Amino acid sequence: MLYLDSDILVSPSSPNLFEIVPSDCLGATVIDHLPPEVAPAVANGWITNDIHQTQKQFGDVNWKKEYFNSGSMLFSKEHISIFESALKVAKQWHEFPTERTITEFRVFADQSVFNYFAKATGAKIYDIGYSYNHTPAFNTFNHRYLSHFYHYARLRPHRRGNRIRQMNLDFWVLNHPKLHKFLTNNIWFTKIFDKL
């Protein structure tokens, strides 16, 4: 099954992820495999903090690294216990009191719970790379049109623009293959197009 957050668009030219990820693995973008300059959550300590806070709440599972973005995940029926466990503790996790400091605040909510139970169940993670979960953070590294799944996480008006407006524009571009191909082959022009 392919799980996608509601703020993800899939390029029609995307390779078939079901043919890429081994059936015994959970496929996801492993954030801490990325260079810190394109993964700010690694560089600023949010990932380490969430790993610590999640284990503090649910118990130590010897989890130190391999944190994935849960916006795009491919999994099989053997991974269903991860989701069943996450659903059982969702209310508890949401109500877990925190201070709004870097040492106590949970940044990623459900994502941390999915990661925790993947680690606790010993699930093998297959890193699908950022091209199957391209968030705005990766735009400095590579343009989203060169990726397969465009994830508009953390795209808010006070940061990088309006999420719905950008999704609608990109949806329109994806439905015009010649324009999409032109923009993909002319990233310099695409950066101008993005500012319209």
Image (spheres, rainbow, N blue to C red):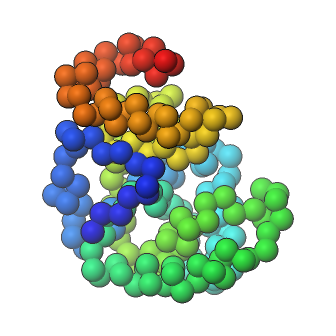
In the rendered structure, the answer to whether residue 147 lies left or right of residue 44 reads: left
Residue positioned 37% across, 33% down in the render: 170
Q: Quadrant of residue 53?
A: bottom right
Q: Quadrant of the N terminus?
A: bottom left
Q: Residue at x 43, y 38 (%)?
A: 167
Question: Residue 48 location in percent, x, y?
Answer: 64, 59
Q: Residue furthest left?
A: 19
Nearer-the-camera pick, 184 or 40:
184
State the image quarter where residue 192 is shown.
top left
Q: Does 167 appear above or below 41?
A: above
Does 96 appear above or below 38? below
x and y percent of residue 142 in the render? Answer: 41, 29
Residue at coordinates 61% horizontally, 65% vertically from top-left? 109
Residue 48 is at least partly visible in this image: no
The residue at 20%/39% (across/down) is: 13
Q: Nearer the viewer, residue 15 or 65?
A: 15
Q: Is residue 104 above or below residue 102?
A: below
Tell me if residue 130 comes above or below residue 97 in the rendering: above
